[in-house]
Image: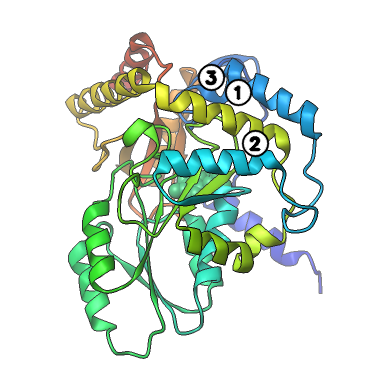
């Protein structure tokens, strides 16, 4: 018996299905240009929607916090104590998100995989949108409770599941959705889901990762001012940094500090990261012009793609899928784009369902009209 045989089998299987992932070494040049081998590529797959990852104020504040507090946070915040900079930033998040409190977690993935297990017991029912991100799927599975997926953005289906599970000995219900769906770039109807949550006394959790920085009041996401029990958002996308936040009530924050393993059993984020988040929270609310620009660019790209006959699904945001369907054809388009110095990823099963392969294009406020026209021109040539 060879103890590594399963690894070979899996990797060979992926290879033969053209699904083997590999890391590619790149050198970032600017917020929207990347050096791949010896080629300068225009990047249309980053989540750096506002181009903040290289912003001078974020770098400066990161350095300031590092110099003041050191390179590491040395322990969980429950062991050696919480540095005041975490509390300062959490107050800022809560104020911008219009919630009583906020809690910083180490990443969006870590937040999602530990939040649901903290809230659920064996008799809990989790109702999860069928297009929710993998971190939510994993978090639900780790909760060891009943899970039902409702059809994407289908509130009649959600209501049916809520009704059908009344008086079934369930301890509590968690409804989990994304505000902007990461692969389709469409949005959920948060008010309507919040109403349902209220009616059925379910806890509502919204992943605001792709809206934070881009949509909503001060660009701080789509859950601001909404009846959402828990918002999870990330700082690694439009905020140009790293880490995640939970925005919630005082009671829920207190509960999570006591019960959320992803908060309790991990070393807190490094002070430099907290510094860059702090600066991002100063910069993001002032970027209305850039946000408007980003949405206008997204509208322009979508309508240009439609003119070429491309299917962009229900996208209404800076995330624009070009849905091809067939996997091989999607890979061929991705290769074509690469040959023309465009970096754009093919997203295929198992990330999306069979027949829904696509190129996921993402826009930055720093893409120019010229960049968009370059991209459209290359896709036009592909279509011809
Ligand atoms: C919707 C959604 N939630 C959570 C995550 C995970 O966030 P992070 O990259 O901070 O781990 C991602 C991104 O990868 C995401 O797209």
In the image, is the residue at mark 2 within 8 Å of ligand 1 by its beta carbon?
A: no
> Which residue lies under the disc numbered 2?
274
Classify mark 3: residues with Cα within 10 Å, few (<14), some (14-19) or many (20+). Answer: many
Left or right: 136 with respect to 72? left
Q: Residue at x 36, y 31 (%)?
A: 218
Q: Secondary structure at mark 3?
A: loop
**Above or below — where is 76 with respect to 38?**
below
Q: Which mark is residue 263?
A: none
Q: Which mark is residue 58?
A: 1
Which of the two discs, 2 and 1, labels the residue nearer the N terminus?
1
Q: Residue furthest top?
A: 370
Q: CA distance from mark 2 to mark 1?
A: 10 Å
Q: Secondary structure at mark 2?
A: helix
In front here: 254 or 52? 254
Which of the two discs, 3 and 2, labels the residue nearer the N terminus?
3
Instruction: Examine the image and state in which quarter residue 361 appears.
Output: top left
Is mark 3 in CB contact (under 8 Å) with mark 2?
A: no
Instruction: Examine the image and state in which quarter residue 40 appears.
Output: top right
Q: Residue at x 41, y 83 (%)?
A: 171
Which of the two discs, 3 and 1, labels the residue nearer the N terminus?
3
Q: CA distance from mark 3 to mark 2?
A: 21 Å
Classify mark 2: residues with Cα within 10 Å, few (<14), some (14-19) or many (20+). Answer: many
**Above or below — where is 140 with respect to 364?**
below
In front here: 116 or 321? 116
> Which residue lies under the disc numbered 3?
31
Instruction: Examine the image and state in which quarter residue 203 appears.
Output: bottom left
């Amino acid at each position: 018996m060879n103890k590594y045989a399963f690894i070979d089998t899996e990797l060979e299987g992926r290879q033969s299905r053209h699904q083997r992932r590999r890391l590619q070494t790149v050198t970032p040049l600017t917020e929207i240009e990347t050096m791949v081998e010896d080629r300068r590529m225009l990047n249309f797959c980053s989540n750096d929607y506002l181009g903040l990852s290289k912003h001078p104020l974020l770098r400066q504040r990161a350095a300031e916090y590092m110099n003041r507090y050191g390179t590491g946070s040395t322990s969980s915040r429950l062991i050696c104590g919480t540095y005041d900079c975490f509390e300062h930033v959490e107050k800022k998040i809560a104020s911008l998100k219009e919630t009583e409190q906020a809690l910083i977690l180490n990443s969006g993935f870590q937040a999602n995989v530990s939040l649901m297990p903290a809230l659920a017991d064996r008799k809990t029912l989790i109702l999860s949108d069928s297009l929710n991100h993998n971190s939510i799927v994993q978090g639900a599975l780790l909760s060891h409770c009943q899970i039902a997926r409702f059809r994407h953005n289908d509130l009649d289906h959600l209501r049916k599941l809520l009704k059908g599970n009344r008086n079934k000995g369930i301890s509590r219900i968690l409804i989990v959705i994304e505000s902007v769906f990461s692969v389709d770039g469409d949005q959920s109807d948060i008010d309507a889901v919040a109403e349902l949550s209220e009616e059925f006394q379910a806890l509502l959790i919204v992943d605001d990762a792709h809206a934070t920085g881009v949509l909503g009041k001060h660009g701080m996401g789509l859950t601001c001012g909404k009846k959402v029990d828990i918002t999870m958002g990330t700082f690694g996308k439009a905020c140009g940094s790293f880490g995640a936040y939970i925005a919630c009530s005082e009671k829920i924050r207190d509960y999570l500090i006591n019960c959320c393993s992803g908060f309790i059993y991990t070393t807190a984020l490094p002070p430099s990261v907290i510094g860059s988040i702090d600066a991002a929270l100063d910069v993001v609310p002032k970027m209305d012009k850039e946000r408007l620009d980003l949405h206008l660019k997204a509208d322009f790209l979508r309508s240009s793609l439609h003119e070429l006959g491309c299917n962009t699904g229900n996208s209404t945001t800076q995330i624009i899928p070009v849905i091809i369907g067939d996997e091989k054809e999607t890979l061929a388009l991705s290769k074509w784009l690469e040959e023309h110095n465009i970096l754009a990823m093919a997203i295929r099963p198992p990330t999306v369902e069979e027949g829904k392969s696509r190129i996921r294009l993402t826009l930055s406020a720093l893409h120019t009209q010229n960049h968009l026209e370059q991209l459209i021109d290359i896709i036009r040539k592909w279509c011809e």
